[in-house]
């Protein structure tokens, strides 16, 4: 199985090209705050993802979602955060993991930024951890889970600035 | 995450609570599994009733437990899996790997 993002490895330039092509519309570094955005920054600690889980819980409570849909979003956001902590920032607690939640309209979007060098997006996106030979692998499921539960998952990598995971789910509603 | 172990008959019950996220959690569970096998107990029940969520790293802990015990000729079963965790199992097809039960009692009876 293709391994997930590795600390300080990969081919950031290639990954950046691929990821930008996947989602060129998202503006990642706007300084302008918008009322439909919620920003949360946590230290690079796995335990701090509990905070993010609670934030997601609070946000989805404001939207008419089924339990399954709310879970899908929460699971995916935690996975994006896990990747940022583990593979992006490599557990460096001095680095931030930034979350931007964008609500409104018929979709929910979260953008997760780490400060890592990025990874080979194409390689990871093609990995399938559900094949018989990969089913018992101890790792390599994070991005697959996100892609399974969200409608769109893309990445943008900017050399020297970090990696952005952009997760979007169209809301079906129906609690 | 907290991990506690108790024995009922020939089954070792490992009760996890909190968030299963890897890191130190993995070592704690690995030690309990190892202790169980060293004591000759190859039937392991992992109760997830008080686990609020699992990430992909936490899934790796459950898989490692399954592989370790199975390779030793035993079996691992799971009880009280939340809807959220079950949703992850379905997506990753790990529901085809783990036997899951609604209660500890049902899981114990299945060994």
Image: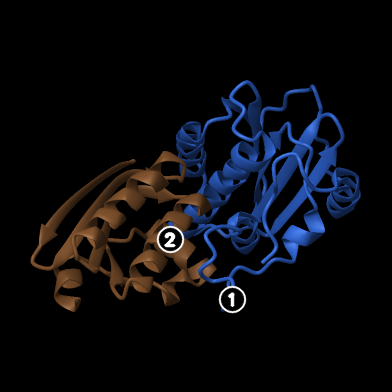
Chain colours: A blue, B brown
Residue A153 lies left or right of residue A91; in this view the side is right
Residue pointed to by mark 1: A133
Q: Residues within 10 Å of mark 1 (few under 14, many from 20)?
A: few
Q: Nearer the viewer, residue A9 or A74?
A: A9
Chain under label 1? A
Q: Determine whether A114 is above or below B62 in the image.
A: above
Q: Position of residue A16 (x, y in %)?
A: 87, 46
Relative to A33, A69 lies left or right: left
Picture quarter containing residue B12?
A: bottom left
Crowd class of label 2 (few under 14; some 14 to 19; many from 20; radius 10 Å): some
Q: What residue lies at 50% left-to-right and 44% top-to-bottom?
A: A60
Quadrant for the N terminus of chain A in the image: bottom right
Question: Alpha carbon of mark 2 to alpha carbon of mark 1: how far?
Answer: 15 Å
Residue at 81 percent across and 27 percent down: it is A30
Circle 2 chain = B
Task: Tell me the tag on residue A80.
Answer: none
- Quadrant housing the C terminus of chain A: bottom left
Q: Write down the quadrant of residue B71 in the picture.
A: bottom left
Coordinates of residue A79 in the picture (x, y in percent): 57, 48
Q: Residue at x 45, y 36 (%)?
A: A50
Q: Which mark is residue B64?
A: 2
Q: Secondary structure at mark 1?
A: loop
Residue A124's quadrant in the figure? bottom right
Q: Nearer the viewer, residue A1 or A151?
A: A1
Q: How many marks?
A: 2
């Amino acid at each position: 199985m293709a391994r997930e993002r590795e600390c300080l490895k990969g081919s950031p330039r290639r990954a950046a090209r691929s990821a930008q092509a996947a989602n060129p519309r998202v503006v990642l570094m706007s300084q302008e705050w918008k009322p439909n955005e919620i920003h949360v920054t946590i230290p690079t600690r796995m335990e701090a993802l509990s905070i993010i889980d609670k934030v997601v819980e609070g946000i989805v409570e404001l939207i008419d979602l089924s339990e399954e849909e709310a879970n899908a979003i929460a699971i995916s956001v935690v996975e994006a955060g896990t990747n940022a902590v583990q593979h992006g920032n490599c557990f460096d607690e001095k680095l931030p993991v930034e979350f931007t939640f964008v609500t409104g309209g018929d979709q929910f979007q979260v953008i997760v930024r780490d400060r890592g060098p990025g990874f080979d997006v194409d390689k990871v996106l093609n990995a399938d951890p559900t094949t018989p030979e990969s089913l018992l692998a101890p790792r390599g499921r994070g991005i697959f889970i996100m892609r399974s539960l969200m409608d769109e998952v893309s990445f943008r990598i900017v050399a020297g600035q970090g990696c952005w995971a952009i997760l979007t789910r169209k809301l079906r509603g129906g609690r | 995450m907290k991990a506690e172990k108790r024995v009922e008959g020939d089954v070792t019950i490992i009760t996890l609570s909190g968030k299963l996220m890897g890191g130190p959690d993995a070592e704690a569970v690995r030690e309990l599994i190892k202790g169980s096998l060293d004591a000759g107990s190859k039937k392991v029940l992992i109760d997830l009733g008080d686990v609020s969520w699992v990430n992909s790293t936490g899934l790796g802990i459950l898989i490692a437990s399954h592989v370790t015990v199975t390779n030793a000729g035993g079996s691992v079963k799971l009880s009280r899996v939340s809807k959220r965790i079950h949703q992850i199992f379905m997506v990753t097809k790990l529901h085809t790997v783990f036997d899951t039960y609604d209660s500890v009692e049902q899981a114990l009876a299945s060994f």
